[in-house]
Amino acid sequence: MASDKLSHRYAFLVAGLFSLLILLVLILLCVSVYLRTAGLRDQLTDTFSSSHDNYVSAALLDNASYLSERLFDPLYRLDVTRINEEVQDIYNWLRPKRVLVLDVDGLILSDGTDANPHYAEQQPVPEQLRDQQPHLLEQNGQESLYFPVVHFGELAGFVRIDLNPAMAGGGMAELESRVEDYWEGFLVNLLVIAASGLALVVLMTAGLIRYLRESLSEPILHMIEAAEEFARGNLGFRLTDLAMGEGEVRRLGNALIQMAADLSHAERRIMRQANFDVLTGLPNRLFALQELERMLLLAGKHNTRVAAMFLDLDDFKKVNDTLGHEAGDQLLVEAAERIRACLRGHDVAGRLGGDEFLVLMGSMTELDDSRTLLERLMNRFRQPFHLPGGHELVITVSIGVAIYPDHASDVSTLLRHADVALYEAKGGGRNIGKFFEEGMNQGMKRRLLLEQKIRESLVKNRFYLSYQPEFDIATGQMVGVEALLRWRCEELGDVASDEFIPVAESTGLIIPLGEMVWRTAVQQLASWRRTRPDFQLAVNLSPRQFRDTGLISGIARELEHSGVCAEGITFEITEGVLLDDQLNSDRLLQRLRDMGFSVAMDDFGTGYSSLSYLRSHPFDVLKVDKTFIQELESHPRDRELLRAAVDMAHALNLKVVAEGIETSAQLHWLRDMGCDSGQGYLFCRPVSAADIDRLLVAFSGAGRLAEVKNLQTPGADRFGTAG
């Protein structure tokens, strides 16, 4: 009995000692696993944090160039509306604390709000931006993204984006929370395993060790490896099913894989936005220029040619203004589709912005290839566009082409020459394609100089008016004048109208010039009518002025200010006004007539002008161009044509005015045809307002044309705001 007790006691002692030994082993094992897993957890968290921070920083710096490209044009043009739109896009994307757009001196231009309370405040520009590269900088605990707004080396300003810590930390906080949840679950499992190990003794302890090693440690090591691959940018790295483990560890692995997939999707979306136009799906300016650089490298190696074509839709702004931006956007989308349809397989088309497109032809061996594409594009755009609302429009395109290496040896020169050719094409009218020629550079420099001097002369009041008298052909009485715009530039001297008017027309400067002409002429007319109440005035209106929405209100305002009656005032237009937008032009012409003005068809006998214009448009006066008058003496057929035109005009109750009368024989023929009035060097050259005053005094008596001879002054041929 004692031995049994002893054996039991010994057995209990051995069992107790063995149990204590197993317990100690389990405790040591659990502590070891706990410490190792805790270290792996911290390492995993640090790796996640580092890879996430590195990725966010790299993404911000990479996309600074894209933001700079988008902001350059509005910042360079000081287009505050577009700057604010771009800033709002940054707010929507990054959710920053603040965005500041600075000029090159560090002065605040915009913070994206309409109020803009800190406008023109000085902001320090970090020294690091001298290298014109983006930087992430931290000041007083605030991390900010700084980058310059620069294009082809030209600095337009800077942008400061104060980052919101929640942006960068939001995703990491969620992941850390998941890691903590999984860690707590792991501790619970560890305690359960330890308690179960007390009963299962040695075999279960060995199995537990193996289980812990295979189900926890190795999967976490594989996840650390995956996180390090993700940090290096290898978002395609995949965890095998065995490396994923089971239970909470598998959930952790799935979360890691999902994070990599989300980052990869975001990267693809950002790359798409950075390289392609959202509206048309075409490559944007940045991507298209990169393709052009690649094409030039290949062309240099293989001795081939590259064509760069600038395309600009004619009168696109008019579509936006009249039909709305939805129609304008649809027009751009359809235009992009037409361009795509004309390209060869390896050609590239991109949208530069607005209604401007770039087409690149690489690997050309013959210049005829580019001519063929040019003709294909021109023909495709002559077909009508079908826009929302049932609108059908013909929107043509102007194209400028430059060829590498014939016209340029580098990207910037090639693009500049294509732009020069486009300018020439648009200057020649519309629906025109032109290849670059060396002489265009000089013409472009001259036009740029004229544009600059026109702006300066507007400020310095270097423009003035001369007046071409108009005489009644039957009586010889002076009945009125035509206001003619003159320009005497300080540096260039007297500049002819046929040179500066097209520049003013293409740049929009014709609007302030036309306002000056109308204001000056109507004020002068008020003075003349105090002597001659029936004295008449003719003023030219250009196609660009007709597209100005403030034309009618401006005319009415100056008329009211001067106190002059509209009767006896004639606005002269050319066929270019009717070709631009016939329906809108007729509506404006009728509004002018309703106000009491007369409307004249100017330069009849040139271009496409025909008698059908007189029947289909609301005209009161027909002005026969001087080129028609000059042929009267030598061409009987021209005399008969003019006689028929005068008869038809009179049948339509139109007054007929002849321009450029220089000989008595011409005057005789015009009087015989019944022409109402005329102007020309036979009567009087363009003179100043003071000379018109003297003429009015001379004609107040019995005087007629004889008194004019002493007042004639030298002058160039006729020019006015209509060109």
Image: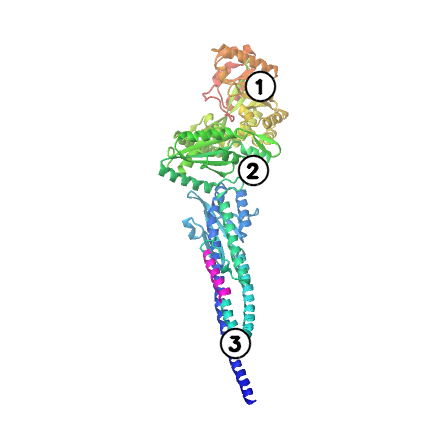
Q: Is residue 22 above or below residue 166?
A: below
Residue at numbered disc 3: 23
Kind of residue at disc 1 = Ser
228 falls in the magenta region: yes
Q: Give how far apart the Cα atoms at labels 2 and 1 are.
A: 36 Å
Q: Are marks 2 and 1 in contact (CB under 8 Å)?
A: no
Residue at numbered disc 1: 612
Q: Pinpoint residue 385: horizontal percent, then vertical percent.
A: 56, 31
Question: Secondary structure under badge 3?
Answer: helix
341 with respect to 128 (left or right): right
Kind of residue at disc 2 = Asp
Residue 128 is at least partly visible in this image: yes
Q: Give how far apart the Cα atoms at labels 2 and 3 are.
A: 77 Å
Kind of residue at disc 3 = Leu
Q: Is residue 634 above or below residue 7?
A: above
Q: How is the image coloured?
A: rainbow
Say which label, 2 or 1, has the lower sequence index.
2
Q: Pinpoint residue 430: horizontal percent, then vertical percent.
A: 50, 28
Say which label, 2 or 3, has the lower sequence index.
3
Label 3 crowd (10 A; few <14 / some 14-19 / many >=20): some
Foreground pick, 445 / 152: 152
Q: Quadrant of residue 595?
A: top right
450 falls in the magenta region: no
- Over which residues does the magenta segment extend? 213-229
Question: Secondary structure under badge 1?
Answer: helix
Q: Is residue 334 above or below residue 184?
A: above
Say which label, 1 or 3, has the lower sequence index.
3
Residue at numbered disc 2: 329
User: Which numbered mark, 2 or 3, is in the foreground of this view?
Assistant: 3
Q: Give how far apart the Cα atoms at labels 1 and 3 are.
A: 112 Å
